[in-house]
Amino acid sequence: MTRNTNNRDRFLQPEPGRNTFAGGLSFLRRKTTQDIQGADVVVSGIPFDAATTFRPGARFGPQAIRAASVQLAELVGRAFPFGINPVAVLAVADYGDCLLDPGYPQQLVARVEAHANTILASGALMVTLGGDHFVTYPLLRAHAAKYGPVALVHFDAHVDTWEDDGERLDHGSMFLRAKREGLIDVTRSVQIGIRSFSDESHGFTIIDAPQVHEQGQKATIAKILEVVGAHPAYLTFDIDCLDPAFAPGTGTPVAGGLSSAQALGILRGLGSLNFVGMDVVEVAPAYDHAEITAIAAATIAHDFIGLLAQKRLRGEWL
């Protein structure tokens, strides 16, 4: 069923002519609401960083990404490079943040999964702002419950498939757990930008950062499209995939990563994939400079929504 195109007007902020840099924060200045019936895309934050293994602070990531998104929130203009205004094509709402109690970190998985289930039950596609990368694990549980095992398109400096005991809150091991639980189809999954050593690929196709630098964006895009195919795909973007020159505000920076231009160029080439959800994580604004990390993260989420808007206009996503 095609959604009512008038829905997008329900999610405009009041006083749409005001300056985008003024007033309350929301992603792309969309309306903050939990009345999301009819929304095409729902943005939500997961302000959690208790699973970090080095520098904390990603709990403030959703707030920073929203603040950095305001310059992208043109209400009448066309977004580069799409030539369209994504929020004029899609009904986009900001749900606010998942309610978490930092005194009970062991409740995180159940709370985030329930939070995601509520949003997904509306029929909307979920765009999540982290938080540390462990939050992707409960998000995958919710998405796999709806779509079955998903292809993981994973941008990161780290493979995040190290061993744990199945209970540990650790942002470096959750994808091995997700594989073992059948949440992801590793034969259809790709890790991009990796620059950490692992003895075992666990079945993932790995395109490490040197390969991206040497082979270029077009070859990287072609490989991702080949591996993922038409399978339902979930995009997870750890901002430390970018070199610290482009994303210093993160918990575990690693030199030699992708530039913002490389990452955005690759992402913009993936519009034909069957994406069912995405997150951008590990923005830690206390270590940022001039908001460059948050701006990169906001642009990644914005451009993902732009890809969805293009698919809507092509009649490929209803």
Image: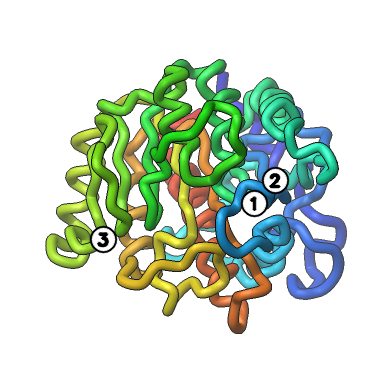
Look at the image and name its color scheme. rainbow
Which image quarter: residue 191?
top left
**Around disc 1, counting alpha carbons within 10 Å, would you say few (fewer than 14), some (14 to 19), or many (20 or more)?**
many
Q: Is residue 202 left or right of residue 128?
A: left
Q: In the orientation shown, which residue stands out farthest toward the bottom? A: 290
**Around disc 2, counting alpha carbons within 10 Å, would you say few (fewer than 14), some (14 to 19), or many (20 or more)?**
many
Q: Amino acid at mark 3?
A: Ala
Q: Nearer the viewer, residue 57 or 294?
A: 57
Can you give x and y, in whole percent of width and height, for residue 279 in the image? 54, 45
Can you give x and y, in whole percent of width and height, for residue 278 in the image? 51, 41
Question: Compared to 11, does 227 lie above or below?
Answer: above
Q: Amino acid at mark 2?
A: Ile
Question: Compared to 52, does 3 lie above or below?
Answer: above
Question: Compared to 162, does 192 lie above or below?
Answer: below
Q: Is residue 185 left or right of residue 307?
A: left
The circle on residue 131 is 1
> Which residue was labeled with disc 2?
46
Question: Compared to 283, does 43 lie above or below?
Answer: above
- Identify the residue at image location x=67%, y=27%: 113
Q: Secondary structure at mark 2?
A: strand
> Which residue was labeled with disc 3?
209
Q: Amino acid at mark 1?
A: Gly
The circle on residue 21 is none
Q: CA distance from mark 1 to mark 2?
A: 5 Å
The reply to whether the C-beta atoms of the residues labelled 1 and 2 are less than 8 Å apart is: yes
- Identify the residue at image location x=63%, y=30%: 124
Dot 1 or dot 2: first in sequence order is 2
Q: Nearer the viewer, residue 155 or 314?
A: 155
Q: CA distance from mark 3 to mark 2?
A: 27 Å
